[in-house]
Image (cartoon, rainbow, N blue to C red):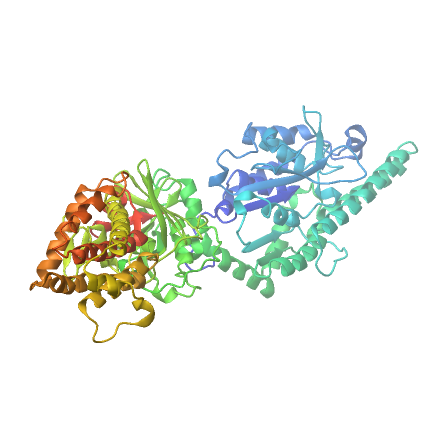
């Protein structure tokens, strides 16, 4: 890591910041606890490990007599005292596990059994139905249990009635397969792909190497077979003790050699795991480092030969192929690290926020050091993205530290996605990063957010001070915190029933939310109950955000138009005068077509029949609305022309239409929903009460207006979204930055 460009050589390196899970057994278990559970940097862990050696192995007891008297060469009490003085009674279960790397160590039960399986002591919650109960373990107990190598230390005896010893001596010496197995069953890792796995050995031993992919069960069965052989050797040694001390010593020495060979042979698991990973996780970066020759000849208790171990290891790392492997591995994990101490105190960047930053480091390019400071590179969700054609990636399932990257992936804006050419980024100092709770935030344009939600929205609602928008790309939650506007995006909650409107214009969305509509002459005008929707031209292809009370106005107009249409159709069907109209209305003009020389009565009859037909059809889209509007205009204008003929007087068409509008408004204002249509029928029949005044065209005009209002109001209701006041303020506000995270 020291050789990677951008990494300050003077910075401390904390593996807990780089990896999501660290597992170990025996001496590797001690290292896993130091780096994972206790969060040490590498240099501190080395120094602490060197301190432990003399306290563990520096007392009397490394003799055959110790094996005979207590079953092990060394007295465990100095080791246990050193551990307790070091970590105290800290629990193995990490109370802040969501802010830290997960860690486990392995051991095996101290009681001999025909089938041996490893016991996994975790810093995180045990899986369901586990009998390990990690929450009962202390850190020092886990350290003592995982390193209780047979013939070196006796098993750890707990007050809970159990004893445990080093699992490495019984075949479970390489926990890499268990790390993979654990990673696949940790709930928080669900849906995440393993990107990198590093396996560190203690030196090669000459053992057979299995070829080809194998399962966990095969790996475990191999380990159990080795453990069974050791059990048999132990029983033989116990029988020999009944003979002569010299024979017993020779058997115990052979047992020790078997244990050491088994404990230090880790390559069988490595080769099995290599082929398994190639088959199951082909894109994983798997790195195995294990010095060949020399280290397996150093006794486990010979702590004084640390310099020899370091020399052999350095020679191994200088091999060109190994050096390249190290550099390539470091280059993969370097972008997901923060090196050294943060340039700000924990109150500025809480540990859990730091973990989320590291999780996204591949995309946010987290880099720097304590001296020069840290920077992050973040996407810009600017207003310029509004109206752009974005190829939505519904198959995205990656778990990110900030939901902003989840949205970027869903919109195809990440580097390897289809819309990456549209992606804009900015690099900012870590000190300027906004975070809220456990996550860090990325700025998003308010206007882009409004447009994006509008393109995919199904429903908008409010609970307390939070506004929710359900869409077919995920759920958005808007709220304020400490005076700042925040947005949370959850791509896992998607609706599949939304009827969306593509290619909307942000300006039109905002005009509608401001209560503006286009009049028949194309000019913008505010909605006014005095003209109802007689002259409204709904904005095509935009969602209509409205407050509930305004939606009810349109719904009332729509319901009234339905009732008025039914009443006018009924009256027209039973009309007896004028005769020219009744004769014309008795013909089926929709089937025969209207001749070019048709009379005014015939034209009116044909228009009414078309209006009646359309009244029986639902207005499902704007094209149907347009047809209905055109038919309504035919009815109204034909009614004006026919009225002049029926009355035998010259009539101005515009005046006729304006008076018909006024009559419609009066009928609407006096109508009481829910009491039936009797009042409307009475008002319209009054127009026909004087047979000398042929006013059937006045009733027909109301039919045309009812059709017009029904079409326009239904078209608006099809586009409308019942919206809370807070969302209306967001939609109509000036552009500005919100914080997405």
Q: Is residue 3 left or right of residue 581?
A: right
Residue 495 shows up from this direction: yes
- Nearest to the observer: residue 700 or residue 617: 700
Q: Residue at x 48, y 36 (%)?
A: 96
For the view shown, which residue lies furthest in the right direction?
243
Residue 701 drawn above or below residue 226: below
Pick the front one: 640 or 99: 640
User: Left or right: where does residue 686 sit relative to residue 178?
Assistant: left
Q: Nearer the viewer, residue 240 or 613?
A: 613
Q: Quadrant of residue 455?
A: bottom left
On the image, the x and y values in percent for residue 491 come to: 43, 51
**Residue 79, position as x, y percentages in the image:** 64, 32
Q: Is residue 261 visible to us here?
A: no
Image coordinates for residue 416, horizontal then vertical, percent: 44, 64
Q: Report the residue at 26% width, 43% height from top.
A: 677
Q: Is residue 211 left or right of residue 123?
A: right
What residue sits 20% from the left and 62% below the top? Answer: 579
């Amino acid at each position: 890591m020291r050789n990677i460009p951008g990494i300050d050589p003077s910075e401390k390196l904390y593996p807990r910041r780089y990896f999501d899970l660290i597992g170990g057994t025996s001496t590797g278990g001690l290292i896993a606890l130091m780096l994972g559970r206790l969060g040490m940097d590498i240099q501190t862990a080395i120094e602490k490990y060197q301190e432990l050696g003399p306290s563990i192995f520096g007392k009397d007891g490394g003799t055959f007599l110790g094996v005979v008297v207590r079953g092990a060469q060394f007295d465990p009490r100095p080791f246990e005292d050193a551990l307790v003085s070091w970590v105290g009674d800290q629990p193995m279960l990490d109370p802040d596990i969501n802010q830290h790397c997960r860690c486990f160590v392995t051991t095996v039960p101290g009681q001999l059994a025909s089938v041996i399986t490893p016991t996994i002591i975790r810093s995180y919650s045990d899986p369901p139905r586990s009998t390990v109960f990690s929450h009962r373990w202390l850190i020092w107990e886990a350290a003592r249990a995982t390193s209780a190598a047979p013939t070196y230390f006796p098993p750890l005896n707990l007050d809970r009635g159990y004893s445990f010893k080093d699992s490495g001596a019984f075949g479970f010496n390489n926990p890499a397969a268990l790390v993979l197995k654990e990673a696949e069953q940790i709930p928080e890792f669900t849906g995440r792909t393993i990107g990198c796995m590093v396996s560190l050995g203690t030196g090669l031993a000459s053992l057979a190497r299995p070829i080809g992919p194998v399962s966990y069960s095969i790996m475990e069965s191999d380990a159990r077979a080795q453990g069974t052989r050791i059990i048999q050797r132990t029983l033989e040694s116990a029988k020999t003790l009944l003979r002569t001390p010299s024979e017993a010593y020779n058997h115990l020495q052979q047992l020790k050699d078997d244990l050491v060979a088994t404990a230090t042979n880790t390559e069988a698991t490595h080769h099995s795991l290599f082929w398994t990973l190639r088959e199951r996780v082909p894109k994983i970066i798997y790195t195995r480092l294990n010095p060949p020759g020399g280290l397996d000849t150093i006794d486990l208790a010979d702590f004084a030969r640390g310099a020899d171990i370091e020399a052999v290891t350095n020679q191994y790392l200088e091999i060109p192929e190994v050096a390249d492997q190290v550099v390539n591995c470091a280059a993969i994990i370097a972008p997901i690290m923060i090196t050294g101490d943060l340039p700000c105190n924990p109150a500025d960047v809480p540990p859990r926020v730091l973990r989320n930053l590291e999780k996204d480091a591949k995309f946010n390019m987290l880099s720097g050091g304590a001296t020069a400071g840290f920077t992050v590179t973040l996407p810009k969700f600017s207003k310029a993205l509004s109206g752009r054609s974005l190829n939505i990636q519904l198959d995205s399932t990656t778990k990110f530290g900030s939901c902003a990257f989840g949205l970027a992936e869903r919109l195809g804006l990440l580097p390897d996605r289809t819309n990456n050419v549209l992606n804009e980024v900015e690099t900012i100092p870590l000190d300027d990063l906004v975070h809220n709770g456990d996550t860090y935030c990325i700025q998003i344009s308010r206007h882009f957010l409004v447009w994006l939600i509008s393109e995919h929205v199904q429903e908008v609602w409010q609970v307390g001070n939070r506004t929710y928008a359900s869409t077919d790309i995920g759920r958005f939650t808007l709220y304020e915190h400490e005076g700042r506007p925040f947005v949370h995006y959850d791509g896992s909650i998607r609706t599949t029933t939304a009827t969306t409107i593509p290619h909307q214009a942000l300006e039109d969305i905002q005009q509608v939310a401001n209560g503006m509509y286009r009049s028949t002459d194309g000019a913008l005008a505010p909605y006014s109950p005095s003209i109802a929707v007689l002259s409204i031209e709904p904005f095509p292809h935009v969602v209509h955000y409205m407050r509930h009370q305004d939606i009810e106005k349109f719904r009332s107009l729509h319901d009234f138009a339905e009732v008025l249409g039914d009443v006018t159709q009924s009256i027209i069907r039973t009309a007896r005068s004028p005769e020219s109209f009744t004769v014309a209305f008795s013909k089926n003009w929709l089937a025969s077509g209207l001749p070019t020389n048709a009379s005014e009565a015939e034209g009116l009859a044909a228009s009414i029949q078309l209006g009646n037909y359309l009244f029986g059809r639902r207005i499902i889209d704007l094209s149907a609305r347009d047809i209905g509007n055109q038919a309504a205009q035919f009815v109204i204008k034909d009614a004006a022309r026919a009225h002049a003929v029926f009355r035998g007087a010259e009539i101005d068409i515009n005046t006729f239409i304006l008076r018909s509008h006024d009559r419609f408004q009066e009928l609407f204002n006096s109508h009481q929903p829910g009491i039936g249509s009797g009042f409307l029928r009475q008002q319209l029949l009054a127009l026909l009460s004087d047979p000398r005044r042929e006013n059937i065209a006045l009733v027909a005009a109301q039919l045309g207006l009812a059709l017009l209002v029904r079409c326009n109001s239904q078209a608006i209701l099809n586009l409308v979204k019942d919206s809370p006041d807070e969302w209306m303020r967001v939609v109509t506000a000036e552009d500005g930055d919100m914080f997405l995270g």
